[in-house]
């Protein structure tokens, strides 16, 4: 149980285009989903927390107009990187919790490697 | 401030035992997580401790001392597939995870 999928796994795009990444909980309802960014050999950096049906909470320094997050249902959250630039190239990972308690284990999707040319 | 410290890299031999330490300082504490991350992949959950003591799960065990702000992950009978980064993360009073930078474990034959 507790499987999270992410799509696409890899994407290469031109500078200035927008890229949408989907995160789905396959066998549970995810009341809360998290979006992380990870640079090579670095730890995870939390970008935002999203709860189903409400606006995402962004971490300090993360541009909400550039990284659009939509948590449309209990099994799907999307991250759209708008007007992508080479510095947005990174490994983006989502995680989800079932929200059955305050202390919930986060289950991670496989990640999306974004390369902006 | 909030901080997690763990060694950057460790090397061990196949079949041996290795202990990866983690110290934390957080605003409040709601438990400590260990995750395994293979290169190029997302983290996978290994363990969660909120009470003092040792939790054993197969070849992997995790220990917590709340008074010392200290945890360790113990890996026994090391296998080559255990080569990965091991991430320590403490949950603060707001139930936010504070992540360590990860310990890269290299297993040699």
Image (tube, rainbow, N blue to C red):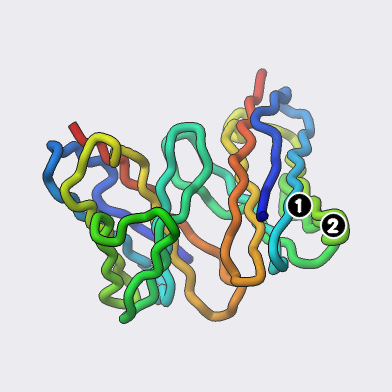
Foreground mark, 1 or 2? 2
Vertical side of A53 occupied by B20: above or below? above
Label 2, secondary structure: give it: strand
Report x, y in % for residue A89.
29, 38
Q: Is residue A2 left or right of residue B93?
A: left
Q: Which mark is residue B65?
A: 2
User: At x 73% / y 55%, what residue is drawn?
Assistant: B25
Q: Quadrant of residue B91?
A: bottom right
For the residues bearing labels 1 and 2, Cβ distance under 8 angstroms: no
Q: Nearer the viewer, residue A46 or A107?
A: A46
Report x, y in % for residue A66.
24, 55
Vertical side of B92 occupied by A5: above or below? above
Q: Is residue B31 left or right of residue B83?
A: right
Residue marked by disc 1:
B62
How packed mark 1 is, by other alpha carbons closer than 10 Å (few <14, some 14-19, many 20 or more), is many
Q: CA distance from mark 1 to mark 2?
A: 10 Å
């Amino acid at each position: 149980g507790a499987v999270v999928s992410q799509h696409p796994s890899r994407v290469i795009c031109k500078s200035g285009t927008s890229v949408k990444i989907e995160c789905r909980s396959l066998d549970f309802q995810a009341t809360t989903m998290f979006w992380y960014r990870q640079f090579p050999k670095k730890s995870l950096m939390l970008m935002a927390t999203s709860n189903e049906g409400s606006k995402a909470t962004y971490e300090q320094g993360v541009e909400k107009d550039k990284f659009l997050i939509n948590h449309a249902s209990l099994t799907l959250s999307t991250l759209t990187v708008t007007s992508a630039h080479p510095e947005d190239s990174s490994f983006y990972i989502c995680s989800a919790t079932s929200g059955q308690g305050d202390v919930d284990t986060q289950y991670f999707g496989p990640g999306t490697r974004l390369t902006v040319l | 401030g909030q901080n997690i410290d763990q060694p950057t890299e460790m090397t061990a031999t196949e079949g041996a035992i290795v202990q990866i330490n983690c110290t934390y300082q957080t605003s409040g504490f709601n438990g400590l997580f260990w995750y395994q991350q293979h290169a190029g992949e997302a983290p996978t959950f290994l363990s969660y401790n909120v009470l003092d003591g040792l939790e054993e799960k197969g070849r992997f065990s995790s220990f917590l001392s709340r008074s010392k702000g200290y945890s360790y992950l113990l890996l026994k009978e090391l296998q080559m597939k255990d080569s990965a980064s091991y991430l320590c993360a403490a949950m603060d009073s707001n139930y936010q995870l504070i992540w360590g930078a990860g310990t890269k474990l290299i297993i040699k034959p």
